[in-house]
Image (cartoon, grey):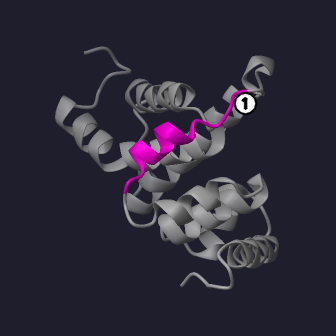
Amino acid sequence: MSNGLQRTSKIITELYNEYVDMVYRICFMLLRNPTDAEDVVQAVFVKVIEKDVQFKNKEHEKAWFIVTTQNHCKNQLKHWWKKNIAFDMNYHDAYYSDEHSEILEIVLKLPDKYKMPIYLHYYEGYSTDEIANLLKINASTLRSRLKKGREILKNILGGELLE
């Protein structure tokens, strides 16, 4: 193996199995296109292989995947030809068939500044301080966005509050 490819295939497979669904959900949430989401998923895992990133612990590992995925998605969205891609709801329905898919569908339609905080808090289990650090925003700003995002969701869901 070359210097950049120091991880064993077993470790790479374990990382892939643990994070591929989360990485794909973040990509799909931000890009709203299955083909682009798959491209970014591939780029994220190629990066983890080539860069031989050393993780301090499991929290650092998961945070690295989230931040790296978000950054790759932002880069993807910078291309002018990507801005007019339609949201493929049929693909979304096939991919998210669990009981929370209706709520996730609504979360995906939230404005961007509410979407990622809601997703990271309720779907990935991050605390507000952790999310603020990941998104590089003030913790009080994040809490305000979570509150406003919950209010929007509550209105859409007819007054039912998510717990």
Q: Secondary structure at mark 1?
A: helix
Of the pair 72 and 161, the residue shown nearer to us = 161
Residue 20: x percent and y percent? 37, 42
Taking depth in this image into account, of 18 and 48 the one nearest to the observer is 18
Query: Taking 92 as reference, is 162 above or below it?
Result: below
- The question of residue 109 being in magenta is answered with no
Q: Position of residue 65 (x, y in %)?
A: 49, 46
Residue at the left extreme? 10
Query: Looking at the image, is 109 positioned above or below residue 68?
Result: below
99 lies above or below 5:
below
Quarter residue 87 falls in: top right
Classify 10 Å Cα crowding around label 1: few (below 14), some (14-19), many (20 and above): some
Residue at point 44%, 54% (across, down): 62
Q: Position of residue 88 (x, y in %)?
A: 58, 36
Q: Residue at x 47, y 60 (%)?
A: 101
Q: Which residue is mark 1?
A: 77
At 46% from the left edge and 47% from the top edge, which residue is drawn? 93
Residue 91 in magenta stretch = yes
**Left or right: 138 as drawn, with respect to 42:** right
Please provide the residue range marked out in magenta: 85-97
Q: Is residue 1 left or right of residue 48?
A: left
